[in-house]
Image (cartoon, rainbow, N blue to C red):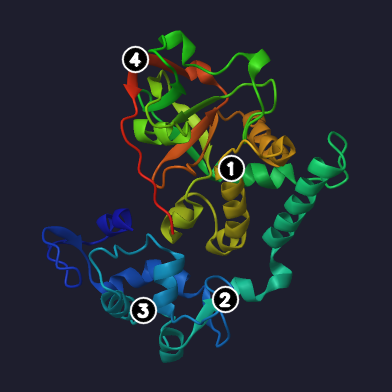
Amino acid sequence: MKSRIQAMNWDFGKCNFCESEAEFIVRCEDLAVHFDPLFELYVNHAENSHSLNPDRTYLLDEHLQLYWSKLFNTKLLKAKDIKHLINQIGRGGGFFSEALFEQPVELKVLMETELMPALDLQLKWQSFSDEIKEKNRFFLSEKIDTDELQSIFERLAVTYPKDTTFYRARISDEPLPIAQLGKPPQKSTTPGRANPVGIPYLYVSESEKTTLYETRIALHEGITIGKFVAKEPLNLVSLKNIADYGPFEILDRGFSLEEFIQYRPYLQSLEHELSKPVRKQDVHLDYLPTQFLCELIKSLGFDAVEYKSAMHANGYNLAVFNDEKLECLDAKFYTVKDLEYKWG
């Protein structure tokens, strides 16, 4: 949205809504050309929500805040300010009506279930997952539309530039040399959420803190953390924070809004599967669907897949297929002095 505002006939001054100074500003009604496609997605719907909490209904401003969670800066804008802002933008466009802006709404495309190919894709993925774990391993009767997945993944591609830093840790009684911080040897590679048995991937995190959490290190244990740097751009598929994608970012990535709304629950389920912590009691068969998913991404020429950390709320991990693009430049040894647990 910021880039769109800067491309318009903007002024420079104080925002009337959040009262921030020295910002790019435009008249609310001038934003209608960008928000009208968003307003057009909605239809009045007096019953419980399909897209959010199914136990209640939502007004348009409430739905926009919750479904598109990064669209507005809720640290600067209160709910009543967002409602006023949406109302002012809407009055400048062609979709304003008192009913649409003041009565409960739902996303129109979710009311037309017979037109939801993504729902069919999600059901097929579940059937595929069940079959590959329980019935057939190599010759499957439930096929996945890999062409459709390829189209989705290519629009979720992210490139990290050369010199981007990542981290990997190994629990150790003493400092480990850099040579021992890469991916494990092929013969000792156990199956993980992303890699099959005997096929090692390099798992790295975006910060030392995340990789520390990922090891599940105990109190007083030692750990060596390696600093990895990208020697060249790293091209990957990002399956983290799917719900954070805003409508304008979606359009810039080549999705239509209706298309992404349909795919979003399916992509969130893939994100959830990849982000599950690997536990000792897990059955290795449970990893087969996500291993297939990662191998598909690898076969499309991507260097890695990115997913949210299950152990650190704000962190994320990469399963790197092409580890030749990363180099470990430094290693530090730590001993854990304190742990903190939270429960609810």
How far apart are the two marked residues, 1 and 2, measured between alpha carbons? 26 Å
| Residue tagged 2 | 54
Q: Earlier in the sequence, mark 4 or mark 1?
A: 1
> Element at badge 1?
helix
Identify which amino acid the numbered label 1 is placed on.
Leu
Indicate the quadrant where residue 286 lies: top right
Residue 329, given in percent of the width and then of the height, sits at 36, 14
Which of 49/285 is in front?
285
> Element at badge 4?
strand
Q: Earlier in the sequence, mark 2 or mark 3?
A: 2
Q: Earlier in the sequence, mark 3 or mark 4?
A: 3
> Element at badge 2?
loop
Q: Nearer the viewer, mark 2 or mark 3?
A: 2
> Residue at position x 34%, y 24% from top?
335
Identify which amino acid the numbered label 2 is placed on.
Pro
Q: Earlier in the sequence, mark 3 or mark 1?
A: 3
Mark 3 closeness class: few <14, some 14–19, many ≥20 residues within 10 Å: many
How far apart are the two marked residues, 2 and 3, measured between alpha carbons? 26 Å
The answer to whether 300 is drawn above or below residue 128 in the figure is: above
Contact between labelled residues 2 and 1, with CB atoms less than 8 Å apart:
no
> Residue at position x 60%, y 13% from top?
185
> Residue at position x 46%, y 69% from top?
37
Q: Residue furthest front?
A: 220
The answer to whether 174 is drawn above or below residue 165 in the figure is: above
Residue 104, given in percent of the width and then of the height, sits at 48, 85
